[in-house]
Amino acid sequence: MSVNGHSHPKKARKDMSPNVIVVLGAQWGDEGKGKVVDMLACTADIVCRCQGGNNAGHTVVVNGNEYDLHILPSGVVNKNCTSVIGNGVVINLPQFFEEVKKNEEKGLADVKGRVFISNRAHIVFDFHQAVDGLQEIAKGKKSIGTTKKGIGPTYSSKASRSGVRLADLLGDFSLFEEKFRQLSKSYMHQHPDLEVNIDEEVKKYKDYAERMAPFVADTVSYLHEAIAAGKKIVVEGANAALLDIDFGTYPYVTSSNCTVGGACTGLGIPPTTIKEIYGVVKAYCTRVGDGPFPTELYDGLGEILQTRGAEIGVTTKRKRRCGWLDAVLLRYSHMINGYTAIAITKLDILDTFDEIKIGVAYHLNGKRLLTPPACSSEMEKVEVEYITVPGWKTCTEQVRKFGELPQNARNYITTIEELVDVKVKWIGVGKDRSSMIEVF
Ligand code: GDP
C-alpha cells in the first residue's frame, strides 16, 4: 500500500466492504472514549483522528507506561498499528513534535513511518492560539471556555479560505511564505494587541517543512486502499456530540463536527464504508467549561460524582461540572449519530447512591420537549422531568459478566436501553483496561 497517492483509484474502489469502526463521544466529552478506542485499537490496523486538534486528550497506560495523547490517535501505543491524522484535523506543528518527543521518552516506539498526517490538514499557528486567548478575554463573562489551543481561530481561517495547509508548507515554500505573511498581517490588523515576528516564524517553518516531510501524506488514497484491502480501521472521535458545531449547545461548542458526518468529511471516506458506530456514554453527565447543562447537580450529590469519578480535565485540569444522565440529550445524540451500540462507562461511580435519577423530558413555556431546544438561552431555562430508580449500593468493580451485576444495576442499564432505543454493548466498571463487561 502506498502513502503517496499514486495508486489507481479504480483498483481501490473495487471492494469497499464496510470495515470502518467509528467511536464517538455521546455527551459533552470525557466519557471514557479512550478506553473503548484502546480496546478496539489493540486489533486495529489503522487508527484515525478525523476532527479537532490537540484540545482533546487522554492518558493511555500500557505496561506501566503512561502516555499522554492529545493529537496522536491512541492506536499509536500499538507498534503494529498505523495512525492517521485526517484532513479534518487542525495541527500545531511545535506541539505535535513536543507530544511525540515526550511520549517517545516514556517508551513509545519511533513514530516515523507509522504516523501519517493528511496534506489537506490545516496548520494551527502560534498566533491562532494567541488570538484564541484574546477572543476569550474580549467575551468576558460570555466566554466559551475554550482550551485556548487555537483550534477555533484555525477553523475560522479554514472557513474564510485564508487558512494554510500542510500541502502548502511542503510545496513551493515561497507560496507558503506569501500565504503565511498575508494571514499573520490580517490577524494583526484585526487584533492590535497581537504581535507576530513574521520573519522569525517564516524561518521556523522552513525548518518544520523538512521535519514534517516524513509524516505528511495523501491519506485519502491511503485509506481507500486500506479499506479495499479489508484492513481494520478505527476512527477515534474527539470532543463529543453535544459539542458539535452544528448540533451541540451552540455557541458553547467546539469548532468542528464531532458527530458521525465528521468521520467522513474529516477523512474522505464514504458513509458506506462505515460498519459500526459506537457511542460512548458516561453513566451520569459531566461538562467542562461554560454552557447549558439541564441535569447539573449543585448539591452534595454533584460533589460525590465529581470526587468519586475524579472529574478533572486531562487537558485543562479544570473541575468538571457533574449531573444526572440526560436521556433527552442521549436520544438526540443517537438520532444524529445512529449508534449501532453504545458503551456505558463509569457505572462503578454510581455504586454508593441510594437512588439515581435520569432526565427523561424537558418542560419549557408549558410544553413538554423530547428533544433539546436549539437556543442555548432556552436550554438554560428548561425544567427537567426525571424518573428515579433505586441504587444498588454494591461495589461493581470486580464484575465481568452482565448477569453478575446487581439487579438494580442491570435495571439501570436496561432502562437506558429503553429510553434511548439502543443496545448497550460494553459497561465500564473501573479505571483499568480490563474493568469492562462485554454484554454481547
Ligand atoms: P475521553 O476524553 O472520553 O477519551 O475520556 P478518557 O479516556 O480521558 O477517560 C476519562 C477517565 O475515566 C480516565 O481517567 C479513565 O481511566 C476513566 N475511566 C474510563 N472508564 C471508566 C470506568 O468504567 N470506571 C472508572 N472508574 N473510570 C473510568
Image (spheres, grey):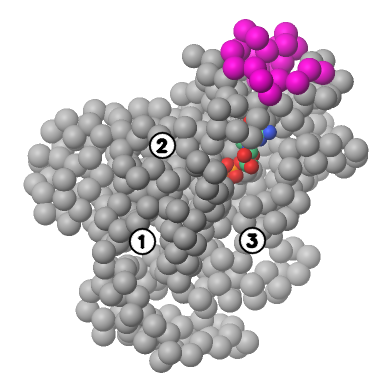
Which range is magenta?
A: 393-416
Circle 2 packing at 10 Å, graded few (<14), some (14-19), many (20+), is many
At mark 3, the secondary structure is loop
Q: Looking at the image, which residue is at 50% across and 23% down? A: 341
Instruction: Answer whether labels 2 and 3 touch (C-beta < 8 Å).
Output: no
Whether residue 243 is situated above or below residue 89 in the rendered picture: above
In what quadrant does ligand 1 lie?
A: top right
Is residue 370 visible in the rendered image? The answer is no
- Nearest the viewer among 228 and 257 is 228
**Residue 41 image label:** 2
Q: How far apart are marks 2 and 1 (CA)?
A: 23 Å
Whether residue 26 is situated above or below residue 216 in the rendered picture: above
In this image, 132 relative to 172: left or right? Answer: right
Whether residue 184 is situated above or below residue 290 in the rendered picture: below
Instruction: Answer whether labels 3 and 1 touch (C-beta < 8 Å).
Output: no
Q: What amino acid type should be assigned to the residue bearing mark 2? A: Ala
Question: Which of the two discs, 3 and 1, labels the residue nearer the N terminus?
Answer: 1
Q: Name the residue that disc number 1 marks.
A: 121
* Residue 370 percent location from the top left of the image: 68, 27
In this image, 419 relative to 334: left or right? Answer: right
